[in-house]
Image (spheres, grey):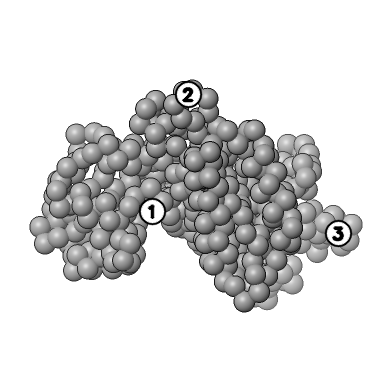
Amino acid sequence: MKKSLKYKIVLAIVIIVCIMDVSFIFVNYVNYMNVNRNYTDSLAQTVANTCRLVVDGDSVTGYLDNRRRNTAYYEVWNKLIDYRNTSENVLQISVVNFRDGGGCYVYDTDLTENGAFLGDIRPYDEVQNAIKDELIACEKIEPLEYNGRSDYYIPLNSSYNIPVAYIIVGISTENVRREQLTYLGYITIIVTSITVLFGVFMIWFMQHNVLGPLNAMSKAASSYSIAILRDGKESPISRMNIRTGDELERLCESMKKMEHDIIASSSQLAIADWNSNHDSMTQLYNKRHYKEQLKELQNDCTIGVIYFDIDNLKRMNDTFGHEKGDAVILKAAEFIRRYLTEQARGFRIGGDEFVMLIRDCTEEKVQELVSTMRGDEKGNLSDVTAEFYCRLAIGGAFRKTAETLEETIKRADDEMYKNKHSVRKA
């Protein structure tokens, strides 16, 4: 019995639709898993980079040797705990040195009874035991996967660039897996709806030979793309207002939800990236970003450098406490921020040290700016005692011909110290 042409066309369309459905779902789901993995890797690396700014590798070696916790130890510990609490996906931050008997803990942000203290040695678990030699050698390893979490092991180096311990960042994968399953459900509904509607429409078209509905479907399908929101404008998806009461309406709402989730994830990545480049207290650029800028500006010959140091900050901390000292640091940052422009960027590179890098400037401009800052009364940062006060010591330099950028910075630093001691003598 011969099959009719209609039967053959319907069968071909069904097969094609099924193949398209499965393939599109598979490709999109794999891409989405990769995006989530990249986000998790990026979050862990951002946390580790921030911890490197707080944890000193040389101090870690000292703590491992004497097992004594001082004020500086608790300050770093509290900062790690605070940073862990900034993201619900960061489960734990630890600093561990691995030995034959297991992991010797220096810092651990787990405050439950399962948490470790300085010097506690925890035996290797099954996952760690498989790479015991690599852990002892403090080599770079892939994340260790557990049920509901991924642990990233990032080596922490001493000032001699020798690995002394691992920064272990535990990232929750429960939310990621939940989002992946949700995404799989959404993408299955969306893609299946599209392909089924497309198949039904193709069959209807073959039966009724109507070109209008085919063109309408093409225009509708071409508008189902995620657009990133910019300048407060709505995306094509958010502007869609389909009220048909059928699969198309549900498809529209599903796509809006998917767009919202993707934009939310992008926003979280942007926030994490901003935090990795800025000092959490002053909101100025941090030392990590400062080093990156130095690499970019090595060949720039029109660079001006202004170096700042808060005079008497240590005496302020010792006499009146760190709360008063922090207030002085914030005043210093506010003072520097008043002079920042599109060409001038401010960095906090130490507890009481700041640097301003100025692009496309001249030596006269640097000298004029230094003179203006030194004459600005707001450079006096405190008046809590007649015995001493905190002020910003300021020195500037413009890059000379055949001079390295590091040499220019050194000259600015020297000028700052001259300014500091001249005012003290006066």
Tell me where residue 275 appears, x and y as whole percent: 52, 46
Q: Which badge, 1 or 2, comes first in the chain's sequence?
A: 1
Disc 1 from disc 3: Cα separation: 58 Å
- As drawn, 29 above or below 47: below
Tell me the residue at 78%/48% (across/down).
236
Which residue type carries mark 3? Answer: Asn
- Quadrant of image for the N terminus: bottom right
Give the amino acid at mark 1.
Answer: Arg
Q: Does residue 378 appear left or right of residue 361 in this picture?
A: left
Which residue, given by chain and number where applicable, does mark 3 sit on? 215
Residue 52, numbered circle: 1
Amino acid under disc 2: Ala
Distance, label 1 to label 2, CA atoms, is 38 Å
Foreground: disc 1 or disc 2:
2
Instruction: State if disc 3 and disc 2 touch (CB < 8 Å).
Output: no
Q: Residues within 10 Å of mark 2 (few under 14, many from 20)?
A: few
Note whether residue 331 is visible: no
Which of disc 3 and disc 1 is earlier in sequence?
1
> Residue 101, how many percent across, how many down?
10, 57
Residue at 44% x, 26% y is: 387
Residue at mark 2: 386
Considering the numbered disc 2 on the image, is that residue within a helix, a strand or a loop? loop
Secondary element type, mark 3: helix
- In terms of depth relative to the viewer, which is nearer, 391 or 53? 391
Disc 2/disc 3 C-alpha distance (Å): 83 Å
User: Is residue 94 something one can see in this rendering?
Assistant: yes
Residue 297 rendering spot, x and y as whole percentages? 62, 67
Relative depth, front residue between 42 and 335: 335
